[in-house]
């Protein structure tokens, strides 16, 4: 399936009235379409309306949202927005009718050959999944999305995979079978058990809700931790840059931090050694070792259990030679037979022999220190390592304070902000630890944060419900299906990520041949191989490559509509990204302002099959001067806006913000 944007039309809305046509004279979409719009012309509103019309979410708008789309100061009763698509060359139109008086939005869909106009959002069944809002955000977005794919505090890359591959449908199946069991169990309670079951069901429902809340809380905490860490690092770089002139102090601080890291490592090593020694009870007190030794000495001398060893002596008497190697004589046979009884005992004595042997394993060799002495030495090493760590930390604080004080008020403010971020990081780390804790020591009145504890209580409540409703077999089948689904989702996610990484890296080898870079993994966000970050051009190139490689999975092709694709990049970055984009998509539509035009537009044009250059501005007193040099026959004028279709006018338009 190939989806293209043929154009859109707005009337009576907050953005100016306009009819944008992105098609050539033959009716096919331009490969590239530039729409130059000064800030304040309604780019963001247009982008939001496009998404709302395509996804059908306008049907769920409240009155405030609907009325907020009417231009300020106007009293007209309605407005309209229409977006026109081409799906494999066939027209498909989505429309939003806005009733400002009643605060209501109505969606309409026009599908020639399929019943004409439908007064609802009614896309073809095969298109529905591509028009979900989460999926739309992959090809209709602000230029910042490409950068957000790399943020450790975000999960946009993982979310993009879920949206395209619809892995959430597996979760829907799991929820469906869960509800099937709940429905079956709901009708099987007797009158005596109904009240108890109601209590159990309420408890289970509350626990499930708590589990969802904690899971989301943990996900947010992980993202916020990454954000706090990034902000702290950014502030640290600012402080370093501001105090760069203090060369010797910075060098001393770097050395002090190296010493601090070494001291921390020593503490960890000493702690590990001490904990290993503490596990042996003999190390905790010398009295334990002395008591064991006294007990061992009080046990009988070494003897063999008669039940298992008597046959040994019987067989030995029949041999021609003794086990010592000498010939077996009658005297020796008599002595062996007589003394065998002295070393044979009951089977209980065999257990005593085992105990004595075990005790001897833990008795130190002559000249070696006792386990207790060894533990005391390790604790002394730990105490020393901890003192050295505290001294190293104090040294770092003193040197850093010297630098901060010399840096002025700005640096002190940055330090305060950094301390706040570090504190936030620590609090979030504690929260995650409490959520990951097994929850074995939770007091009855204490709020539960342990996911493991929550899951145990859910399982316990579920088991009681299944027994009371005689649905044990059905519950087992439900659990089996859910386990299969979870396994399938995990395998699918890992397989898709691996295939995407391979495809992206193969593409990047060709695109960035002079500036090589490689993706290492997709774990919530994109992670580069061997480096934390890359140049701005590299990051955007990888971001766009990932998005389009993802969108091209299968036989489907999508347009790319981007607001401000290059932002504040310098010229060289704009040229690199501009040369990249046309090769990644079948249609590229972009909103730009005049300051984004330099370098980028020319670079895109050089790689595009054909290009459309539109300029759109609002009619105001401040823009009246722009009406004097419009190219004849190349513009369309409405009551409040002007759309110019002319490359020369596009290239010379010098307005960045509506006046």
Image (tube, grey):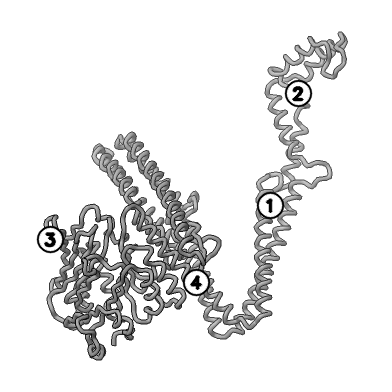
Disc sitting over residue 117 in the figure: 3
Disc sitting over residue 303 in the figure: 2
Indicate the position of residue 125 as horizontal and vertical percent values. 22, 52
Q: Quadrant of residue 550?
A: bottom left
Mark-to-mark CA distance, 2 and 1? 39 Å
Q: Nearer the viewer, mark 4 or mark 1?
A: 4
Q: Is residue 52 visible?
A: no
* Residue picked out by circle 4: 231
Mark-to-mark CA distance, 3 and 2? 100 Å
* Among numbered discs 3 and 1, the one appearing first in the sequence: 3
> Is residue 538 left or right of 340 when viewed as pictured?
left
Q: Residues within 10 Å of mark 4 (few under 14, many from 20)?
A: some
> Which of 524 and 284 lies nearest the eye of the viewer?
524
CB under 8 Å between callouts 3 and 2?
no
Q: Which quarter shows the C terminus?
A: bottom left
Q: Residue at 76% across / 41% down in the picture?
A: 290
Q: In what element is the residue under mark 1? A: helix
* Among numbered discs 3 and 2, the one appearing first in the sequence: 3
Indicate the position of residue 477 as horizontal and vertical percent values. 34, 37
In the image, residue 432 sits, relative to residue 592, either above or below, namely above
Q: Residues within 10 Å of mark 2 (few under 14, many from 20)?
A: some
* Among numbered discs 2 and 1, the one appearing first in the sequence: 1
Q: Residue at 20% across / 57% down in the picture?
A: 123
Q: Nearer the viewer, mark 2 or mark 1?
A: 1
Q: Nearer the viewer, mark 3 or mark 1?
A: 3
Q: Nearer the viewer, mark 3 or mark 4?
A: 3
């Amino acid at each position: 399936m190939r989806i293209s944007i043929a154009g859109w039309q707005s009337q009576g809305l907050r953005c100016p009235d306009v009819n944008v046509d992105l098609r050539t004279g033959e009716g096919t979409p331009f490969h590239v379409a530039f729409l130059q719009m000064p800030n304040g012309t309604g780019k963001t509103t247009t982008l939001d309306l496009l998404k709302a019309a395509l996804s059908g979410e306008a049907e769920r708008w409240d009155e405030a949202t609907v009325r907020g789309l009417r231009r300020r100061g106007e009293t007209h009763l309605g407005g309209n927005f229409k977006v026109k698509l081409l799906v494999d060359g066939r027209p498909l139109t989505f429309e939003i009718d806005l009733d400002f008086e009643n605060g209501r939005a109505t969606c309409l869909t026009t599908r020639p050959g399929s019943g004409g106009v439908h007064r609802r959002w009614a896309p073809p069944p095969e298109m529905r999944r591509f028009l979900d809002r989460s999926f739309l955000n992959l090809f209709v977005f602000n230029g910042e999305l490409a950068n957000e794919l790399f943020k450790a505090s975000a999960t946009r890359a993982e979310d993009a995979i879920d949206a395209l591959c619809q892995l959430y449908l597996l979760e829907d199946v799991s929820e469906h079978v869960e509800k099937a069991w709940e429905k079956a169990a709901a009708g099987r309670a007797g009158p005596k058990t109904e009240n108890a079951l109601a209590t159990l069901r309420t408890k289970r429902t509350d626990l499930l809700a708590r589990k969802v809340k904690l899971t989301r809380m943990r996900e947010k905490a992980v993202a916020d931790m990454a954000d706090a860490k990034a902000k702290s690092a950014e502030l640290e770089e600012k402080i370093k840059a501001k105090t760069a002139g203090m060369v010797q102090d910075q060098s001393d601080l770097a050395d002090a931090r190296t010493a601090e890291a070494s001291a921390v490592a020593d503490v960890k090593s000493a702690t590990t050694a001490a904990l290993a020694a503490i596990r042996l009870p003999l190390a905790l007190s010398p009295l334990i070792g002395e008591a064991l030794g006294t007990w061992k000495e009080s046990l009988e001398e070494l003897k063999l259990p008669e039940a298992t060893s008597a046959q040994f002596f019987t067989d030995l008497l029949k041999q021609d030679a003794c086990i010592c190697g000498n010939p077996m004589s009658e005297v020796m046979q008599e002595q062996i037979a007589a003394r065998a009884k002295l070393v044979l005992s009951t089977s209980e004595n065999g257990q005593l022999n085992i105990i004595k042997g075990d005790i001897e394993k833990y008795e130190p060799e002559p000249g070696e220190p006792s386990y207790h002495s060894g533990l005391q030495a390790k604790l002394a090493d730990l105490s020393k390592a901890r003192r050295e760590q505290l001294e190293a930390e104090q040294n770092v604080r003193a040197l850093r304070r010297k630098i901060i004080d010399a840096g002025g008020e700005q640096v002190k403010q940055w330090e305060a902000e950094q301390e706040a971020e570090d504190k936030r990081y620590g609090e979030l780390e504690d929260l995650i630890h409490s959520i990951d804790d097994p929850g074995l020591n939770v007091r009855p009145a204490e709020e539960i944060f342990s996911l493991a504890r929550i899951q145990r209580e859910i399982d316990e409540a579920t088991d009681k419900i299944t027994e009371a409703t005689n649905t044990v077999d059905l519950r087992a089948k439900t659990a089996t299906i859910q386990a299969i689904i979870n396994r399938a989702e995990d395998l699918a996610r890992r397989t898709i990520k691996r295939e995407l990484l391979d495809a992206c890296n193969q593409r990047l080898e060709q695109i960035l041949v002079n500036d090589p870079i490689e993706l290492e993994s997709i774990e919530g966000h994109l992670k580069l191989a061997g480096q934390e970050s890359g140049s701005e051009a590299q990051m955007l190139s990888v971001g766009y490559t990932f998005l389009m490689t993802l969108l091209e999975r299968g036989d489907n092709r999508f347009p790319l509509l981007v607001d401000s694709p290059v932002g504040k990049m310098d010229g060289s970055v704009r040229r690199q990204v501009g040369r990249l984009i046309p090769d990644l998509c079948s249609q590229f539509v972009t909103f730009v302002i005049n300051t984004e035009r330099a370098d980028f537009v020319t670079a895109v044009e050089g790689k595009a099959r054909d290009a459309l250059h539109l300029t759109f501005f609002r009619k105001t007193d401040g823009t009246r001067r722009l009406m004097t040099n419009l190219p004849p026959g190349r513009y369309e004028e409405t009551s409040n806006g002007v759309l110019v279709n002319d490359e020369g006018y596009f290239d010379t338009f010098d307005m960045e913000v509506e006046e």
